[in-house]
Image (spheres, rainbow, N blue to C red):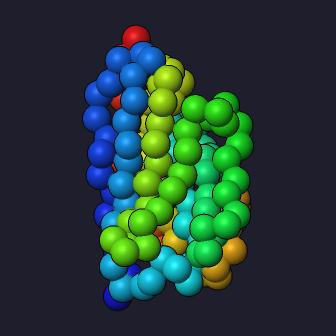
Amino acid sequence: QVHLAESGGGLVEIGGSLRLSCVVSGRNIREYGMGWFRQAPGKDREFVATISGSGVVIDIRGPVKGRFTISKDNTRNTVYLQMNNLKSEDTAEYHCASAFTSAAATMEGSYEYWGQGTQVTVAT
């Protein structure tokens, strides 16, 4: 059984940083693309970042580009999202997801398993 567990969320001031972790059990992240998505209250879930199983392909888009980075530690079967210079509009629940294939992917439909999410709140 595949399980994804996010952690690292919390309350942070504008301009601060947080690192989210996603520990994966039940599958080897070397073999699957991984992604981070977020959903703010009243809004649709949106893509944040993705990394391929090999770690070679990384894609980060939208307003987080240049502030967020995605990485992974295969030995820990864990994917990270480093978030710097946080803004109030980054407030959302952040979810990690594991793709159907080893490719990096930006579309929700490319992902097979999802974590429960971790809340990030950036104080105004």
Q: How many marks?
A: 0
Can you name the residue that lies furthest to the top here? 124
Q: Nearer the viewer, residue 37 or 50?
A: 50
Res 119 visible: no
**Residue 51 image point, x, y percent:** 61, 63
Q: Nearer the viewer, residue 64 or 123?
A: 64
Q: Is residue 58 left or right of residue 10?
A: right
Left or right of residue 104: residue 28:
left
Q: Residue at x 36, y 85 (%)?
A: 26
Q: Position of residue 37 (x, y in %)?
A: 55, 51
Q: Which residue is located at x 52 percent, y 80 percent?
A: 30
Q: Is residue 104 left or right of residue 21?
A: right
Q: Position of residue 38 (x, y in %)?
A: 52, 45
Quadrant assignment for the N terminus: bottom left
Q: Is residue 41 above or below residue 1?
A: above
- The reply to whether residue 76 is visible in this rendering is yes
Residue 6, compared with residue 91, is above or below; it is below
Q: Residue at (29%, 28%) from the top-left corner?
A: 11
Q: Residue at x 38, y 48 (%)?
A: 20
- Which quadrant: the C terminus? top left
Residue 67 % position (x, y) = 58, 32
